[in-house]
Amino acid sequence: MNTNLECVQPVSGEEFEYSYKAEITNVYPLTRMEKLYQIQLVDPMERERFIFRPGQFVMLELPGIGEAPFSITSSPVRHGDLELCIRAVGNMTKFLDRVGRGTRVGISGPFGTHFPVEKMEGEDILLIAGGLGIAPLRSPILAVLETRSRYGQVDIIYGARRPSELLFDYEYAMWRQFDVGLDIIVDQAEPGWQGPVGLITEILKERIAKGQTDRFREGTSAIVCGPPVMFRFVCDLLIAAQVPVEKIFVSLERRMHCGRGKCCRCNIGSTYTCLDGPVFDYWSVLNLKEAI
Amino acid sequence: MDPVKYLKSADLMSWLEELARENKVFAPRYEGDAVIFAPFDPKQEISIKHAATMPPKKTVFPQSEKLVDFTYSKDPENLSRILIEAKEILPKGTTVVFGSRPCDVRGFTMFDRVYLAEKTTDVYYKARRENTSFITLACEKPETTCFCHWVDSSPSDASGSDVLATPIEDGYVLEPFSEKGQKLLTSSLLENGERWILEVKDVHENAAGFLANAPDLSQAPQKLLDVFDNMEFWENAAAKCLSCGACTYLCPSCYCFNITDETTGMKGTRFRSWDNCMSAQFTMEASGHNPRPTKAHRLKNRVGHKFSYYPAIHDGVISCCGCGRCIKSCPVGIDIREIVQEAINHEPAIGKE
C-alpha cells in the first residue's frame, strides 16, 4: 500500500462541487477499531478561513475509493487543522485504516447544524456520550473547556462496551484539570478495570438521585450522542429530572452520499439530516417521527 | 414572425433529421417490448402513439454518468509518491427530445427545485438541463393509469417543455414555450399554424374530458403524516411489494442517486447512478443500523416523500407528475393512487393509540 498520494484537485469549472485539498498529517491508533486522523487543509489561507462549529461534519474524499461524512472531533479553534475519529467498519474506512500520514485527501464542508455551546454560556452543561458518540462530542467538550470560565458546572458521562474500547483515554486527566466531573462506565469489565460497570443510565440516575433536580431545572443544557437506542433512555431520564426538553441536544446519524439534500437517504420525513441536522434539539426529535 | 407553426405528418421524419444535424435527438421507439427514448435514427420507425414505457429522464439525469476522471501517475523524481489528477466531465452539446409527454417533462420541474437550488446547485444536472430542449406531445386520450389531473396538471400541460406539439388531422401544431423552443421552429418545413388554434383547443379539451373528477389532494400531506405511525396501514400497503424498484426507476420525478468510484490500474472514474429507495440497503449504515428496516418503512417513505414531505418544503407542490408508470409497470399491481386515497380517508380507530 502506497501511502504517499499527491492529489491534484480539479481546475476546470468554477462551479465544481468544491472540495479542499487536504493531507493526513498524522494517524493515532486509539483502540483496535478506531483511529484519530489529523487532517490539515494544504493551503494555509483556506485552513485559516475554514470555520466550523462543534457538531458539524465534513465529507472526506479519497479519490478512487469514495466519499463519506464524518463529524469533526477537534476543537473549533483549530480551524482547518481537523481531527476525525474514524472506526474501520465500511469500505472506505477500512481503506483509510491502511493509509498513513502524507496521504492526500479531499475535504468538503463543513455541513449541518451545530451544538449551540455559545448559547449555553452561564449554564451548567451535561455531556453524555455512548461508544463512538464521543467522536462528535469531543468537539463541544474541547470548545467548552477552552472557554471554561463562561460555564457553570460541566459534567461528562461516557459509557463504552469495554475498558479497551474507551476513546481518548489519554485526555481524561487533562479534562479533569478543567474542573470537570468526568464519569466513565463500561458494560463489561476487563482485568485492571477499577471503575464502575453497567449502563450509562445508571450513572445518570445516580447523578439525578444526588439531588441535582433543582439545578437541572434552573439552567442545565445537555448534549447527548450515542447509538440510537441510547437516546430514548438517556433523554427520558433527563426529562424526568426536569431538564427542559428544548435544552437537550442530540446528534443523529444517517447514511449520506451528498451532504446537499439530493441523494434522499438521510431524510426523516421532510427533514434532511444533512441540511437541517445532524444536531437537533430533543423537542424537534420527539416531533420528528422515526428520528430515533 | 408568427410563433405558432404547423407540420405535416409526412414531414415529421425529415424535420427530425434536420434537427439531428445540429443536436442529438432522442425519440421514442420500440426496443423489444418496451418503448424507450433512443437516439433518433431515420431508418427506424418512431413510436408516438402512446406514452413511452420509460420516461426521457436519462436525457437530463443519465442512469449512470461520469462525474470525475482520476489519473494516477508516479512522480519520476520520487517513485514512492503517487500523483492524482482529477478532471471533471461536464456534458457538452445540445439535445432535443421529441415525443415526451407533458407528465414526463413536468418531472424535471420537480428535479429543478432540488438540483438547481441556490446553495446546492448541481453543475452536471444544470449543464444538461440547459442544453436539452423538449418537444412535448399533448396527449389525445389518457390511459386508465393516467392521473395527471390529480396533481395540478393536464394532458396538454406545457410546464417544463420548450415546444408543445398537438396532433391534429394530418399534422402537428407546434407552440413554442421558451426561447429554446422558438429556435427549434425555424425550419422551412414548417408553415404558419395560426389557423389551427381552435382545433388545438378542441383536442386539449377533448383529452381533458376523458379524465374524471380528481379527488382533492390538499389534505394528503397532513393525512399521510397522520398515518405515519400506523405501521399496520403501511404493512398492508406494502404486503405485495417485491422491492424490485421498477416504480422508482420509471418515475420521472424520482431523483435519488448513488456515487461510486471505480479504479482500474492507474485510472479511475467517479460515477453517479440512479438508486432505488425501495432497496433494503438504501439507508443501511456501515454500523448495521438501518433507519428504514422493512419494506413498509420504505414504501411509506416513497409515498410520503412524493405527497407529503416534498410539498412541505417546496410550496405545496406534489412531487408526482401522475404519469402512472409505477402503476402500469408494478409486477404486483400496487397502485399509489389507492394508497394516497386510503390515507386521506383513513379514520383513526377511537381509543386505540
Image: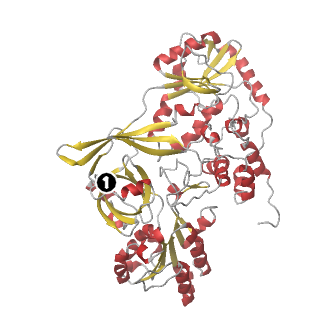
Q: Vertically, is B24 above or below B65?
A: above
Image: B16 above or below A92:
above
How many marks the image carries: the answer is 1
Please indicate whether residue B308 sits to the left or right of residue B26 in the image: right
In terms of depth relative to the viewer, which is nearer, A8 or A197? A197
Image spot of residue B310 (x, y percent): 62, 48
Q: Chain of mark 1?
A: A
Q: Position of residue B152 (x, y in %)?
A: 70, 38
Q: Residue at x 71, y 38 (%)?
A: B327
Q: Outermost residue toward the right?
A: B350
Name the residue at the bottom extreme.
A210
Q: Is residue B318 above or below residue A163?
A: above
Q: Position of residue A12 (x, y in %)?
A: 33, 38
Image coords of residue B52 (percent x, y):
64, 28
**What residue is pinned by disc 1?**
A22
The answer to whether residue A208 is above or below residue B86 is: below
Check the picture and name the quadrant holding the C terminus of chain B.
bottom right
Task: Report which quarter residue A84 is drawn in.
Answer: bottom left
Quadrant into which the N terminus of chain B falls: top right
Q: Is residue B186 visible?
A: no
At x 55%, y 61%, the residue is B289
